[in-house]
Amino acid sequence: MTAYAKQSLHILAATGFVCKSKWTLYRGRMLKRLEDACFESSEALSADPRHAAVVVGAGLGGLSAAMRLGAKGYRVTVLDRLDRAGGRGSSISKGGHRFDLGPTILTVPQVFRQLWRDCGRDFDRDVDLRPLDPYYEIRWDDGSTFAVRQGEAAMRAEVARLSPDDVAGYEAFLADSEKRYQFGFEGLGRRPMNKLMDLVKELPGFVWYRADRSVYAHAAARVRDPRLRMALSFHPLFIGGDPTHVTSMYILVSHLEKAFGVHYVMGGVQALADAMVRVIHAQGGRVQLGCEVDAIETRGDQVTGVRDTTGRTWEARTVVSNADPGHTYDRLLQRPRRRWTSARLRRSRWSMGLFVWYFGTRGTAEKWRDVGHHTILNGPRYRGLLHDIFMKRHLAEDMSIYLHRPGVTDPSVAPAGDDTFYALSPVPNLCGDRPVDWNAVQETYRQKLAQVLDDKLLPGFQAHLTESEVFTPQTFSDRYLSPYGAGFSLEPRIFQSAWFRPHNISEEAKGLYIVGAGTHPGAGIPSVVTSSEVLAKLVPDAEYVT
């Protein structure tokens, strides 16, 4: 029985329209009639292509968009070429190991709690979140370390241990971070930015908060120790940006961590994606995996649906693309474009590439007890390596590594007594005339990475290796259809942010919307879900579509 049918019956009984003494007699008959009426109304709504919506891509942005469209009364179909939902947050399983392919942490959980509330559900009943403490440990080439912790006193003690003279500067940096959070995340980050006046209204804030300054420059203005400058400025790498060029608005991440913590989803981000799929199904929606969209179809300026690679047409007057905007506009939307032309996309700056080695080890769960859930292992250079990656697009001899060891929190990722890891190294994307030939250098680079881990973090681990899988920028291009193998779509520089980014409501076709890392507000789990919050402000409820 639908909730609407139940509610209607109780209203009728309460108002006396149905005599309470005859409630039992009429209840069954009325329920059947109400249920039939609701079903016929729902069928009529869903059969009308004006009330149908197709979401291209089952990444977290696409799934959250589908949830919100379902809550607005649309009959939603999600199409994705992969065999599991989650996009870059999906997983693969090999030999009893579950490898989370993309994001490993969840920050700002209230973004998800609000998403679930918008759908009439309770996030904490569907998803098991575990707070991490420490969030991660940073290690440098000189042997020094810095643990990023929950709690102001613990963090102040860590800063004092590393660089006593920088405690006051660190506290000033946190105050700066909170102000930018209020302006950048809670303010413009959760509002549409598809009109030029939307941007103009925010210009005083950009000036006041020195958006022209880079994240690294802002950290350097507050603290002197080069290690602490790195620890306070590296966060843009989590969303594909160069800390020495990305706008200082992104120092807000430090406040996110302080205020809301860093969490791990039991079962990995794959479990989060699967929970989102269950909500979509409960709303009457559909998630079709193994179905690749080949084109977004239009009649005049209006989208009419999508066509998949088998030739099947999925009709809808509302199409939401969670594919990269570069792929959406350069490949799927096969009509003349006004703003996001092929030439403009080629001129754009794309985020870095990623080299990720997923591997399992046998009998090591009790080894390397000093290596926690997340470790950031710095190479001998910081700014020099960033310059090689982002500006020169040169594959350097040295590297920095982000190591994920989820088994310390979630034993289900590996067979009993074993370990599951992923080691990520930022590398150049595939832009330029002479991109890295990953087919030629993949194994050599993996061996270098393995040696760094063996020397600096996991001594002797190679003797325990079992499963192994490598993703390179070429994999990102082939698997995720990511332009130039970029790990996070367009780089979040100031003139590729907010209004300057591809809009959530397309400039190129009516009824086409964009969510995910490549649109406003940007990459990272909280932002891609917030892009669907912005979407919900732009798409009318289904009942008002004519």
Image (tube, rainbow, N blue to C red):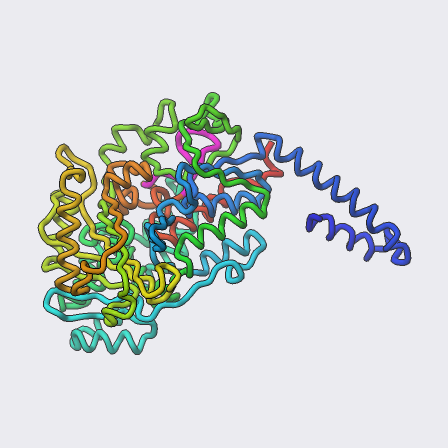
Image quarter of residue 456: bottom left
Q: Position of residue 75 (x, y in %)?
A: 57, 38
Q: Position of residue 128 (x, y in %)?
A: 46, 62
Residue found at the very far top of the displayed protein = 300
Image quarter of residue 70: top right
Q: Position of residue 298 (x, y in %)?
A: 46, 24
Name the residue rendered at 50%, 47% in the picture: 277
Name the residue rendered at 83%, 46% in the picture: 29
53 is within the stretch colored magenta: no
| Foreground pick, 545 / 330 | 330
Q: Is residue 5 above or below residue 232?
A: above
Q: Is residue 134 left or right of residue 275?
A: left
Q: Is residue 154 above or below residue 525?
A: below
Image quarter of residue 208: bottom left
| Foreground pick, 369 / 172 | 369
The count of marks equals 0
Name the residue rendered at 53%, 49% in the picture: 278
513 is within the stretch colored magenta: yes
Q: Is residue 173 above or below residue 294?
A: below
Asked if one can make out residue 9 in the rendered structure from this viewpoint, the answer is yes
The magenta-colored residue range is 501-515
Quarter of the picture containing the C terminus is top right
Q: Is residue 176 above or below residue 545?
A: below
Q: Is residue 125 left or right of residue 30?
A: left
